[in-house]
Amino acid sequence: MKIDFLGTGNGNPNPNHGHSGILIEIEDRYYLFDLGDGIATKIWLDKTKDWSKFYGLFISHLHPDHLGGFFTFIQLLHQIAKLHDDWALNNERALGIHLPSARARVLIEELMDMMHDTCYNKKYFDSEKSGVIYSDEKITVEVLTNKHRPFSRSFIIQAENKKIIFSGDLREPDEIKSVSDNSDLVIIEGAHFPIEKIRDMLSDINVKKLIVTHLLDQRIADKAAVMDILQPLISKMAVSLAYDGYVVEL
């Protein structure tokens, strides 16, 4: 399993830390978590990516730095799919689009209908409560609603006997503490609370690897200070700060 950090910044664009987007690749399948502005363009420009492999898109919440690239992604996928009549994505299977509320699903479906029909299959889902929202033979995705905004959620991902937490945006890191214990990887945002709260939340639970993403501009500018705060965790887990293009294999 490979995890590709496509966008790792906050709401302000940054050359090395764009808007949120994480791609999980498991054998012949792609699962994309968040689609901030510019994420679709990065995938398009990376000629190693095979667009026929997308199985699921999962949006944590509706802020533009997590959703702003969605329509561009759909347009680019449509452009590529037109060249491949033999794609399963055009025929027997659908791309699953998982949104955080029923109203969001209705609005986005209506907007898509106003734009144009796509030549590939797609199916929209919504979930407003915690629970498993997707499962296939490669991956299971569960959401945990959090307090960042209404209909905001974190993701609990199980694949290849590994457990991954992707926090999305939070009000407090303690919101994901119970599900983070015994994780192989915790990917947590660092924009909406002091970094010390991440350190304290993880100090008494079992996590193998921590990656902090979605940092504020001032924290990006002084990553050494962020690592100093997280230093007490290094004796019990691997700790790193995300950047665009960072790839992790589990």
Image (cartoon, rainbow, N blue to C red):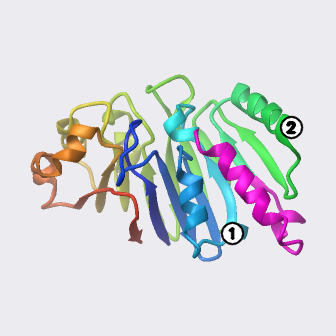
Q: Which residue is drawn at 49% across and 24% down?
A: 149
Is 102 on the left-hand or right-hand side of 139?
right
Give the vertical position of 60 relative to 120 (above or below): above
Q: Residue at x 21, y 38 (%)?
A: 218
The answer to whether the residue labelled 1 contacts the one labelled 2, judged by CB atoms less than 8 Å apart, is no
Is 222 on the left-hand or right-hand side of 30?
left
Q: Nearer the viewer, residue 68 or 145?
A: 68
Q: What residue type is labelled 2?
A: Asp
Residue tagged by mark 2?
A: 113
Residue tagged by mark 1?
A: 53
Tally the marks: 2
Whole-percent x and y of residue 23?
Answer: 53, 60
Is 85 on the left-hand or right-hand side of 147?
right
Q: Nearer the viewer, residue 168 or 184?
A: 168
Q: Which amino acid does label 1 sit on?
A: Lys
Q: Give the range drawn in magenta.
A: 68-95
Name the quadrant containing residue 199: top left
Depth check, mark 1 against mark 2: the one in front is: 2
Is 102 on the left-hand or right-hand side of 168?
right
Whole-percent x and y of residue 157?
Answer: 52, 55
Whole-percent x and y of residue 40?
Answer: 59, 54
Which residue sits furthest top? 150
